[in-house]
Amino acid sequence: RALVILPLTPLPGLLLVALIDAMPLEDIDKGFAHSGTSWVRATVTCFIYTHCAIEQIRLYSPNLNLQPTGVLRTSVPAALLTNILALGLSWFICWPLPFTTLLMSGPWLGFTTFFLLRVCGAQMRANPEAVKDVVR
């Protein structure tokens, strides 16, 4: 069984990378107006890592009682709002926006925390052990 599972374990992650990289990118020199696929790729990638992070919280903290739909209700708006903010900053400042990941890490964490509190804030207030699990 281990010999079958071992080579198959990285396949889902590799498939996601292949799907994201399969989206064609326009030349940066064409400017902001031709950057649509870049933003689609960024949003999909942001959703994937946000969803994985919240799913780990869900699995690690049974006291939180977070359902899979709650994970989606947290990760989808957090990813969308983070990339909308990055899109706006790129439009106002410059394209391509340098250090986008570094600039957006704070807003991403804020949006993720905000929507996690919106989804399961009552459960966290009622159960202090859930808060300790999430903070860890």
Image (cartoon, helix red, strand yellow):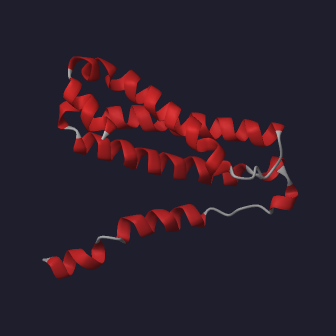
Q: Residue at x 42, y 33 (%)?
A: 74
**Whether residue 65 can be seen here:** no
Q: Indicate left or right for 14 with 7 as reference.
A: right
- Please tell me in which quadrant of the rendered image residue 86 appears: top right
Residue closest to the eye, 129 or 36: 129
Q: Position of residue 39 (x, y in %)?
A: 66, 48
Q: Residue at x 39, y 29 (%)?
A: 116
Q: Indicate left or right for 133 with 88 as reference.
A: left
Q: Position of residue 91 (x, y in %)?
A: 80, 40
Numbered marks: total:
0
**Whether residue 130 can be seen here:** yes
Q: Residue at x 83, y 46 (%)?
A: 94
Q: Quadrant of the C terminus?
A: top left
Q: Position of residue 33 (x, y in %)?
A: 82, 47
Q: Indicate left or right for 15 with 93 as reference.
A: left
Q: Indicate left or right for 80 with 3 as reference.
A: right
Q: Given the current orientation, which residue lies at the most extreme left position?
A: 1
Residue closest to the eye, 23 or 32: 32
